[in-house]
Amino acid sequence: MTENHNTNTIAAIRLALSGGSATASSILESCLNRIDRLDSGIKSFITVARDRARDRARALDDKIKKGAATGKLAGVVVAVKDNINISGLPTTCGSRILNKYISPYDAAVVQKLEREDAIIIGKTNLDEFAMGSSTENSSFFPTKNPWNTQHVPGGSSGGSAAAVAANLACVSLGSDTGGSIRQPAAFCGVVGVKPTYGSVSRYGLVAFASSLDQIGPFARNVDDAAAVLSVLSGRDTRDSTSSPRSLDGLEDLSRVPIKGLRIGLPEEYFIEGAMAPEVASAVEKTVSTIERAGAHVKKISLPRTQYGVATYYIIAPSEASSNLARFDGVKYGLSSSGSGLIDSYKETREAGFGPEVKRRIMLGTYALSSGYYDAYYLAAQKVRALVAEDFRRAFQEVDFIVSPVTTTTAFKIGERISDPLSMYLADIFTIPVNLAGIPAVSLPCGLADSSGLPVGLQIMATHFDDVRMLGFAKSVEDLVQFKPLEI
C-alpha cells in the first residue's frame, strides 16, 4: 500500500507484485509509514507487530524471487482485532485483566490468512471484550473516526474499521456479536461482512457470547471483503459450531444482476422518526436507485424486531457471564492477592474489568440465577426462535432484505458513553441478524450533507447465501460509486 495509493486493493497488490513494481516489503513499509504518520491521531492499533510483519514480508519476497507459487492474499496487509489470538503477540481484548498475556497459539483465521501469504501488521483496538458500540470502552484509549476525529468509529471493532478507512491496512478482521462489524463499517465508510454463523471458525477468538459471535472482514470494496472471506470460511473441527457447508464463488466474485431481484424493506426498520433524516434520505435514495435498475422492491414485516434488543441483552450478557468466569487471575493476566482465593478473585476482577463488562456480567449472572432462568434466559431463547422465523418467512417472499445499518451517522466521542441504554439502541438494526444467524453486509451508500460522515446500507440474506449477497452488494456498489476516504 504505497503513499500514492496504487496498491490499496487486493487486485492492485497482485498486479504490483506480479509486475515487479512493488515488493511485499515495500507495501508493508508504506503501511508502517502511514501508521507512524496518522495513527497517533486515530489510535486504531493497540499493538503494531513491526518485526514479525517484516520477517514475513521478506520471506514472501524471497519466495517470489525463487519463482515459487504464492498464496491468494500474497502481500496483502491485514490488521486483526485484538480479541483474536496470534502466537507470540499480546491478546488484550482491550482489557486490563489480560495484562502481559501473550497468546501461545494462532486462531484458525490467522492460520488461514498466513497460509495464503497475507502479512499481519498488528492488533487493533476494541471495546473491552467486544462489549460496546463506540470503542470508547477500551481500557487503553478511544479510537477516533478517520473521517472526523471528534467522532467515534463505532464498535466494538472500531480499531479494525478505522485502520481500513485510513488506509493503514488493506483489509482487517473484526468480530460481530450484535453489529460489531457492520456498525463501525457504516460509521467509517468501509465494507463490513458478518458471515452466516458457523461459516468461519471461532477457534482462537476470545468468546463474548458464543452463540452470537462471528468473525468477518473489513475492506474498502466488496471484492476485497469477498476475497478475504473466501480464505476464512470452511469447516474447522476445533470449533464445534463450524459448518461443513462451503461458500464457493467468493474468490472471483460475480455480480448478481439487479433486474428481477425481489428486495424486501422491513416496515419495522423504516418507522418515521426512528432514524436521523440524513440516514433515511441516503438509504431511500439508494433503494430508489436499485429499483430503477430493475429490482422489485416491496414492503415486508419482521414483527419481532421490536423485541430484538431486549432479547439480545438477556442472551449476550448471560453467555458473557459464563465465558468471562475463566478470567480469575490464576493462570494468566492480571492477578491481585487477597486474603483468600475468593478475595483474590474479587480483587482481580474489580481491578481488571471495566464498568461496561461488569454491568453485563451482573446482568447475565442475574438472568441465569436460580428462580430467574426460565423467566429471562429461557424466554429470550424462545423469542430468538421467533425472530429467526420472521426472517425465514421473509426470505420465502424476497431474495434480499435491505435496511439502514444505524439510526444515525457516527456520534461524537463522549456523547453517549454515560447513557448505556442509548448506546445499546444504536444496534437496533443489526442485532436481529445475529439472533437469527444469517449473513449481512454493511455497504457505504453516501455521506450525510450536514456532517460529511458516511451512511451504511445493510443487505441481509438467508443462511449460507453469503456469496449471492456479496454479488448483489457488488452490483449495488457499482451503482452507488461511493468514494473511500483518502488522507
Image (cartoon, rainbow, N blue to C red):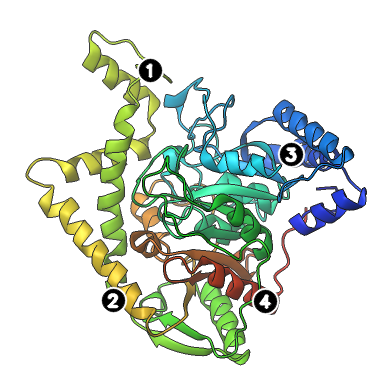
Q: Earlier in the sequence, mark 4 or mark 2?
A: 2
Q: Position of residue 404 (x, y in %)?
A: 49, 71
Q: Which residue is mark 2?
A: 303
Q: Position of residue 33 (x, y in %)?
A: 80, 38
Q: Nearer the viewer, mark 1 or mark 4?
A: 1
Mark 1–mark 3 CB contact (< 8 Å) = no
Q: Residue lying at the far left in this picture: please name it.
A: 371
Q: Earlier in the sequence, mark 1 or mark 4?
A: 1
Categorize mark 2 by other alpha carbons within 10 Å: few (<14), some (14-19), many (20+).
some
Q: Position of residue 10 (x, y in %)?
A: 75, 55
How far apart marks 2 and 3 lie (CA) works out to 45 Å
Q: Position of residue 316 (x, y in %)?
A: 31, 49
How far apart marks 4 and 2 lie (CA) works out to 30 Å
Location of residue 67 by image quarter: top right
How far apart marks 1 and 3 lie (CA) works out to 34 Å
Q: Which residue is mark 1?
A: 331
Q: Residue at x 42, y 25 (%)?
A: 97
Q: Amino acid at mark 1?
A: Lys
Q: Earlier in the sequence, mark 3 or mark 4?
A: 3
Q: Which residue is mark 4?
A: 480
Q: Which residue is mark 3?
A: 35
Residue 190, can we see it?
Answer: no
Compared to 331, does 407 lie above or below? below
Q: Is residue 421 left or right of residue 238?
A: left
Q: Amino acid at mark 4?
A: Val
